[in-house]
Structure formats: C-alpha cells, structure tokens
Image (cartoon, rainbow, N blue to C red):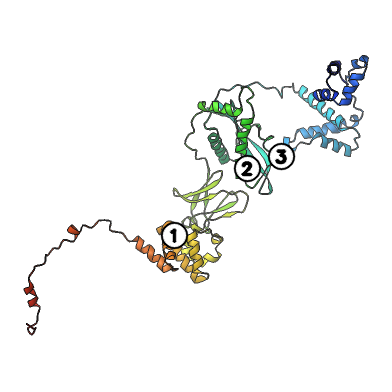
Amino acid sequence: MLVVETITRIRREHRDGKPIKAIARDLRLSRNTVRKAVRAPDADASYERKEQHRPQTGPFSARLEELLEQNEGLPRRDRLRMTRIHDLLQREGFGGSYDAVRRYAARWKRERRADAGDMGKVFIPLMYRPGEAYQFDWSHEDVEIAGKPMRVKVAHMRFCWSRAPFVRAYPRETQEMVFDAHARAFTFFGGVPTRGIYDNMKTAVTTVFIGKDRLFKPRLRFASLEELNIWLEAECRRWAERNGHPDLDMTVAQALEAERPMLQPLPTPFDGFFESEHVASSTCLVSFDRNRYSVMAKAAHQTVQVRAYATRIVIRSDGSVIAEHERVFGRNQTITDAWHYLPILARKPGALRNGAPFQDWDLPPVLAQLRRKLGKGDDADRRFVRVLAAIPDDGLEVVEAAVAEALSAGTVSDEVILNILSRRREPRDTQTMDVVVNLKLKHPPIADCARYDTVRGLNAAA
C-alpha cells in the first residue's frame, strides 16, 4: 500500500502532464499501481499497512530462517540466490510466492543488523595525500584458458588518492607471485607510493576492488594466461580513462598523471623469488612443485638451489646457473633442455634416436640441415653427435659457422667440419710483417763468379 506522500506526488506529476509510464519508471512502481493512485478517492490514501501478514511463510518460517542462516555462513560466491531458496521451500510443500520469501529474508537481515548494533556497515571516511599509499588484495576468479575452465588468483592494486587500478592474474597465490605483482604494478603506475595497506598478510589479502565484478563478468576466455593479463592491463587503462574520480573534477587517468610526480622513483628491479634446495637425479632432473626440470649433466646427483619466480625457474649450483626454464603449473610435467644432456650424448650417441630430451629437438637451422643431409641410421647419428660434441669447447656460433662453411662448399662430412674447427683454433700471428726489417739477410751475397769453379769437376769443359 502506498503512503500518502507517494500518492500525492503521483497525482501532482500526473496533473502536470507527466505520463503514467514515466511516473512508474521514476518511482519504480507498476503502471497499474500508478493508475489506482490517480483514480482512487482521497480517503483511500490514508491507509498504510503497519505489518505484513505472513499466512504462507508462517509454518515455514523456522525452515526459512534455517536456510538463511546456513546461506549467510557460506562464502559469498557460494551463497544461494533467493530464487533458489524459494525453490527449495516449494519442494518441501511451501505454496507462497517468491516475493513473500524475499520480504521475509530482507526483514530477517534487518533484524540481525539491529541485534548487532547496526554497526557492521558503518565506516569512517578516509583521506589520503597524492603518492601516500596503495592498497593490495587478492581475489579468486573463474576464467577459461585454452578452452578449459580455470580458477585464477588475481592480484589487485589501487592507489588510494588517484584510485587508479592494476589487475593481474596468476595460477597461484604464493610469495613469488606477490613479489611479481608488486613489481609489475609499480612499473605500470610509473612510481611507488610511500606505504602499502594490507588487511591480512597471509599472502596479502583484503577486500575485493573494482575488477572482480566489472572485469571478470561474464566469464573471460583467452588462449593463455599471458593473453588474459595483456587484456587486463589494457582494460585497467581504459577503465581509468572512462571513469571519473569520485572526489575530483577529473578522470582517474588524469588523477594518476597528477599523482605521478609525488611518487618515489622505481628502484632497481627486485629479484623476488622463493628458493629451496633439491638433489638432481641420475637423469639430470630436479623435482619442484610436482613437476621436473632438467639441469646440466655435471649437476647429476648434486645438491642444487631452485629459485622459483612467478614465470620462470632458475637452478643454481656452486654459485652459477645450471638451468633456466619457463615455469609450468599442474602436475607430473617434465621440462627438458636437450643441450643439458650433450656431454652424455657424446659418450652415448645411440641415445640421439630414442632419448626423451631429443624428441622434437628444435635445432638451429644450419644444424638441422646438416642432420637431414647426413641421413638416418646409427652411423649418421654418430657423425652428427661428433659435430655436436664440439659445441661445449668451441661454442654454438663457431660450430654453426663451420657447418655453414662446409655446406656452402658442397661437403657433408663431420671430418671436414671438425677440420675447419681445428684450423680456426690455431693461433694467428697478428704481427704485421715489414719486408725491409723481417726479411733482411744475415749474410749478403758476394758478386764473385769464380766461386762456381770450386764446385766444378776436374774434367769439366773449359
């Protein structure tokens, strides 16, 4: 039932010529309700219902409150909609309408807030100076990557003064991801505020900023996580350009430009990683995070240090890097680098055909051409491995140049290639030769033809 003030407003606006459809839209009423208010006598407008009777929900009120209580205790993304709760009640014999359930739930929530002192949604307004602070949080979002559903962990950073956002998705919510998110966000913003605000630093979790509702609805679909992050970064820029600042007469993008001079300059890139020790197996593999990565053959059976970054894995031994791979997620994946096994292959050339690291080996074009020209078979594999075995000593570029020289001469022979490499190893005399100085005779010749008579025999002709 409408109150007197609403009916008076409806009649006044209708008297001024405003259409019933427009009045209904502005007051969020049905057109039939507006028509009744216009046509009803004045006496009919004095009644206002003080209490909504609940003949249908009465017998089910205990069950409805039980469902509401259970629903309130669930995570926000797992809570049931009121339509779903109405459907559950109907299956148990409830004959009332959805509006009856909705009204009861609204009243139930109001009473709970009143019992709690009604302070749960009360806040203190905050004020920040340009460049003073940023806020950081995580949210969990459902996307589709390469045609498969995936729940990603999304890092959100927002500057408190300009309200500029940065959003990036990760497969995990771990320490190295936190480091990477901060480094990328500060690069995106072009500077660093004085301090950061974190509500719960288990890994850095607080409330959900913009982006969860506006950037991830409907479900996003991309071929890879990197494509998703490229789109998110561009979307953050577009959002800042389109939306106005809530307190300033400018857009969020303009506010960020005004805030940048107050930011601290970007420091030296932070080397943020998680390090742990592991033992390399006899197959030159190191297990980390349920996956395996290859290392150089010399590290087999040795203790190594694995540095896990957000997107890559770096493995070290005795202070030097012995492997670097793109990081993979999931389980039971093996990532190998065929070059790590080259010293073993030199001793066991037969492994070239069936060795797992050498399957679909992406060789440099010149070496791939040499392998094709050598042909197939055990002898061809041995000849090709002899050329590869020179790479650790001479270097890949030098061996490629020697192979290219042999191929350009129309020769496909490992002996010729190794001979070219041997010639290139010989030291060259870089000293320039001075004909006058370097070729000066120690015993100048004497112009005396009589000396020839000393070598002539006694019976020589006169």
Mark 1 secondary-structure assignment:
helix
Q: Residues within 10 Å of mark 1 (few under 14, many from 20)?
A: many
Q: Position of residue 320 (x, y in %)?
A: 44, 49
Displayed quadrant of residue 81: top right
Position above or below: 3 against 241: above
* Callout 2: SS: helix
Residue 228, numbered label: 2
Q: CA distance from mark 1 to mark 2?
A: 38 Å
Residue 37, position as x, y percentages in the image: 89, 20
Q: Residues within 10 Å of mark 3 (few under 14, many from 20)?
A: few
| Quadrant of the drawing holding the C terminus | bottom left
Q: Amino acid at mark 1?
A: Glu
Where residue 54 appears, as percent x and y from the top left, is 90, 27
Q: Amino acid at mark 2?
A: Leu
Direction from residue 80 to residue 348 in the image, left or right: left
Which residue corresponds to the image point at 54% horizontal and 34% vertical from the top-left? 186
Neighbour tally class for label 2: few under 14, some 14-19, many 20 plus, Cα within 10 Å: some
Q: Residue at x 46, y 57 (%)?
A: 298
> Label 1 vs label 3: CA separation?
51 Å
Position in image of residue 26 (x %, y %): 80, 23
Figure check: 234 above or below 324: above
Whether residue 367 is situated above or below residue 125 in the rendered picture: below
Residue at label 3?
218
Mark 1 or mark 3: name the one nearer the start of the chain: 3
Between 222 and 324, which is closer to the camera in this rendering? 222
